[in-house]
């Protein structure tokens, strides 16, 4: 699809500007795994965090969680999202977890040790760009025939992010690379 090609080129362009490699499917990963990594990493580079690598172990855990078909965390370092289809998870990650939450994060010097602006959510964003996290494993289950009624995407991260008191060290300022708004 044209739009996907453009987004992939945009990711590649951002990668080139920041001096990182965008991976492709030849790395032995599926399209889903590749998209998940690339759409996480492009935002991480924007916050001077290193790329994540794919963890089959974290993916297996995500699969178990996703198949329960409930929007309920079962470990630390986990992002959940309903209503993401398997074939457009990448753009959805960008929009739901990054673009929608980016400005909810409180960067002011007197921010709390878990610095989200009052009444807002920023925990998905901070986990995506958390510099201490190195590995990612995600799974999207089709929960449409369950009471949940949508697809459910689970991503697990290790080392886990969103550790109280560690935000300043792990959520770096954005360096202003192009907005990915699929
Ligand atoms: C990079 O950061 C800027 C803010 O400096 C933000 O507007 C933009 O959406 C970010 N781009 C990506 C790809 O994360």
Image (tube, helix red, strand yellow):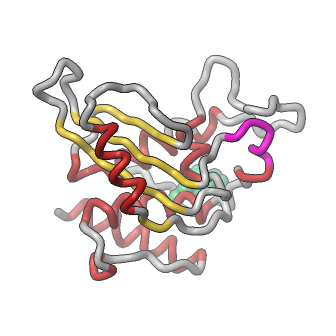
Residue situated in front as seen by the camera: 34 or 78:
78
Q: Is residue 47 above or below residue 69?
A: below
Residue in the image at 79% along x and 52% along y: 169
Q: Is residue 159 left or right of residue 92?
A: right
Q: Is residue 116 above or below residue 11?
A: above
Asked where in the image residue 176 lies, by quadrant, the reply is bottom right
User: How many numbered discs, if any?
Assistant: 0
Q: Is residue 92 left or right of residue 83?
A: right
Q: Quadrant of the N terminus?
A: bottom left
Q: Is residue 166 magenta?
A: yes
Asked where in the image residue 20 lies, by quadrant, the reply is bottom right
Give the farthest residue toward the left: 145
Residue situated in front as seen by the camera: 48 or 56:
56
Image coordinates of residue 56 in percent, x first then y, are 37, 62
Image coordinates of residue 175 in percent, x first then y, are 68, 61
Residue in the image at 80% along x and 33% along y: 113
Q: Is residue 155 left or right of residue 68?
A: right
Residue in the image at 33% along x and 66% along y: 34
Residue situated in front as seen by the camera: 32 or 121:
32
Image coordinates of residue 102 in percent, x first then y, are 59, 41
State which image quarter holds ligand 1.
bottom right
Q: Is residue 36 magenta?
A: no
- Chain part drawn in magenta: 163-168
Q: Is residue 171 above or below residue 118?
A: below
Residue in the image at 73% along x and 54% along y: 172
């Amino acid at each position: 699809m044209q739009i996907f090609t453009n987004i992939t080129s945009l990711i590649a362009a951002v990668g080139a500007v920041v001096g990182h490699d965008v991976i492709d499917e030849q790395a032995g990963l599926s399209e889903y795994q590749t998209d998940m990594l690339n759409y996480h990493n492009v935002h991480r580079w924007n916050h001077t965090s290193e790329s994540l690598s794919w963890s089959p172990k974290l993916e297996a855990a995500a699969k178990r969680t996703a198949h329960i078909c409930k929007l309920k965390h079962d470990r630390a370092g986990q992002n959940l999202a309903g209503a993401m289809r398997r074939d457009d998870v990448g753009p959805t990650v960008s929009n739901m977890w990054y673009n929608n939450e980016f400005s909810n994060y409180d960067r002011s010097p007197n921010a709390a040790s878990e610095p989200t602006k009052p009444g807002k959510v920023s925990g998905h964003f901070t986990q995506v760009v958390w510099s201490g996290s190195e590995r990612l494993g995600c799974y999207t289950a089709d929960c449409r025939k369950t009471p949940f009624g949508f697809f459910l995407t689970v991503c697990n991260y290790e080392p886990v992010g969103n550790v109280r008191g560690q935000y300043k060290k792990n959520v770096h300022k954005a360096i202003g690379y192009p907005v990915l708004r699929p």
